[in-house]
Amino acid sequence: MPRLAECAGFCQGVRRALDLALAAAAEPGPWCTLGPLVHNDAVVEFLEARGIRAVERVEEAAGSGLIIRSHGASPGVLAAAQAIARQVVDATCPLVKRVQTLARQMVQEGYRVVIVGDAAHPEVQGIVGWAEGQATVVASVEEARRVTPAPRLAVLAQTTREQETFFDITRELLPKSLEVRAFNTICDATRKRQQAAREVCRDVDVMVVVGDFKSSNTATLARVCADTGVRTYRVERAGDLNPEWFAAGARAGVTAGASTPEWIIKEVVDTMVEFEENAARDEAQENQPEPQAQAQQEETWQEPQPEPEEAREQSFMELEAEMAESMSKGMERGSILKGVVIQVSDDEVMVDVGGKSEGVIPLRELSVRDLRSAREEVQVGDEIEVYVLRWDDDGTILLSKKRVDMKKALDALEEKFHNREVIDAKVVKSVKGGLLVDIGVVAFLPASHVDEGFVRNLDDYIGQTMPVRIIEFNRAKRRGSQVVVSRKDVLSEQRERQREEFWSTIEEGQVRTGRVKRLTDYGAFIDLGGFEGLLHISEMAHVRVDHPSDVLSEGDVIDVYILGVDREKERVSLSRKRILKSPWETVLERYREGDIIDGKVVRLAPFGAFVEVEPGVDGLIHISQLSHQRIEKPEDVVQVGDQVRVKILGIDPVEKRIALSLKEAEGSEAVDYEGEW
C-alpha cells in the first residue's frame, strides 16, 4: 500500500473557491471564471460540466456572472469586472488577500516592495497591481543580488513558494537597505505539504507527486521531493503512471498539490496498489517452487489473500481512513480559541489563532444578529474568542464567533431563567405563531404571550424593545427555539403591583391624571395607572354633551376628580366638570347690567325666549321685552336659531338667572368681549 503524505490535496482556499463557484452556478444566468479557478484541468472540466467556463479576458465576461479565481486579481481588473460583468463573486483565497493588503499598505508607508515569486504567476501579477505597480519580483537569490538598494524595503512572498528560498532571498536583501521588513506570507498549507512530503521521502524508494503540470505549488512539491534524493515522478492523473516505476518490494509514497481533487488522489493510489499487486504476482510466479516442494507447502495452512477486486476496495477504505486521520490531527473540532482579527471584508473575517494558523469566519457565523457587513461587528486588531467548526490540513480553519457568543449568552440566560429575572428583548421578526426577539440569542415570543389581550397585528411590534421573562430554557433542543419568553407574565405582574399601589392610595376628592382608554355611549374609561375609572357623560362638561367623542378622544391625557371609590366592587367614578371653571364664573367676570350683547335663541316658552349667552349659560327675554308692541306669543317675533342682539337688564348670581331685553337693544351696538378672555 503506498504511503500517503499527511497533508495532500485541496487546501482551504481552493475548497472555498470551489464552494463559491458551485453556489454561483446554482443561480440563473451564465457564469465564468477569470482564468482557471485553480491550476488543475480536472477541476476546470468539472466546472465546465456545470456551466462555468474559464475566460482569459474580462471583456469576455460581459453580461455574465464572473468569479475571481483563488489567485486573486489586481484592483484594476476588479474594477473592470464590476463595470462589465452582471455579477462578481470574489473567490480570492483569504491568505492571498492578506498579501495584497500588505503590498498596498507597504507602498503607502513609503516602502519599496519586493515579492519573492514567479513574475508570470497570476497571484504575483495581482499582488503587483495592489502594490500600485511599484513592486519588484525576484525568483532566486541571483535575481535578489541585482536588486538596487533602497532606504526602506518590504519583502513579501507568493503564498506557494518554498520557505527556504524566501529566507535566502531575504538574507540577500538585508544589506541593501537601512530598514527591511520581511513578511512570511507563504501559505501554511504549502509549508506543511512540503514538510509532510519530506517525511514520506525518508521511508520510501519512489515518490509520486500528483497535480496539474501548470500548478506552481505542485512543481515546488516535486522539487522538494527530488532534493531528498528519492526517485520522484510528477503525474496529473492515474493514466500518467508507469508500472515500471514500481519494482516488486519497492516502497512508494504519494503527495499532491493544493489544487488536486481527492478523487484524482484516490485514483492514483488505487492504480499504484494494482501495480504493486501485479509486481508481487510476477515475482511469485518467477520463484514458483518445484512440484514436491509445492506439495509440502500446500500441507501448511495459509490465510487466504483478498482477490484483486477486494484489494482495490480495501485500498479505498485504507486511503479514506488515512486521509481522515491526517485531517483529524491538530486543533480539535469544537475547541474554543482566542484570536486576533487580521482582515475584515463584507462577507468574512480572517482571524490569527496562533501557531501560524489562520481561520475564516463567514458572515453567517459572526453574530446572532443579522448583519449586512462583517465590519458592523469587528475591526482589525480586535481580540475575540472563536469556535472551531471545521478544519483543513493546511492550517486554515472554519470558525464561528456566533457559537461562542451564543454559549456565553446561554450561560447568562440560564442563570436569569432560574432567578426569574426580567430582561430586555428587541423584536427582530414576526413568524408564524409569534415573534423572534434578540436577547443575546434569538428567542421565541409566542403570540399568546405578547400582551395580556389578543394581538391583531404582530408586525406592529417589530423594532420595539420590551421587558420579558424566560419561561422555557432547553440547551439540548435541536428543533425550534432553545429559549421561549413571555411579555404577558411581566405585564401581569406590573399590572398587579400598580393595582395594589392604586387601591392603597386612591381617595375621594383627589385630582389625578389619566389617559382616555376607550369611549362608550355613556362615558369614557380612564386609565389611572393600573386601574380604570368611569367618567360618566354627565360629568364631562358643564354643558350638555351628546356623545363622549364630542369632547374626548382615545389617548387624550386629562385631569379628573375622584367622585367616589368602592373598594369592595373595585369601582371608581370620576368627574371632569368638577375641576373645570363654571360658565357662571365667566359670566360674572365679563358681563354687567346695561351691556348690549349678541346671542342665539335656543328655545321658546309661552312666557318668552331663552338666549344662549355663553355655552352653558342661558338668559331669558320675557315676552314683554320682545317688542314695543303687544304680542300673543314669542314666535311672532323670534324663532329658535335666530341670532339676536339683546340688552342685559339684570344678573342674579344666586339664582343663576340673566334678564334680557330685545326691544331695548334695538339700534344699539353690541359690546365686543373677545379681548377680555
Image (spheres, rainbow, N blue to C red):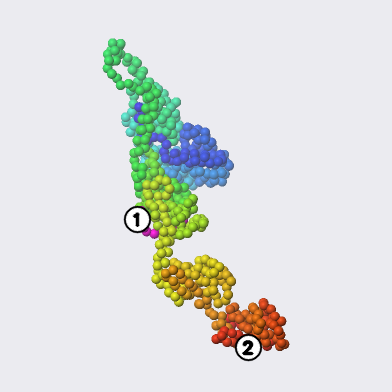
Q: Is residue 396 above or below residue 506?
A: above
Does dot 1 land on a helix, a strand or a loop? helix
Residue appearing at x 34%, y 55% in the figure: 418
Instruction: Estimate the x, y position of residue 281 in percent, counting from the top left.
Output: 36, 19
For the image shown, how many numbered marks are present on the structure?
A: 2
Name the N-terminal-most of marks 2 and 1.
1
Q: Is residue 668 above or below residue 328?
A: below
Residue found at x 50% / y 66%:
517
Q: What element does badge 2 sit on?
A: strand
Q: In the rendered view, does 406 fall on the left or right side of 294?
A: right
Q: Which numbered marker is on residue 576?
A: none
What residue is shown with label 1?
A: 418
- Label 2 is placed on what type of residue? Leu
Q: Magenta part of the protein: which range? A: 414-427
Name the amino acid, label 1: His
Quadrant of residue 208 within the rendered picture = top left
Q: Nearer the viewer, residue 553 or 361?
A: 553
What residue is drawn where x is 34% and y is 32%?
200
- Tag 2 residue: 649
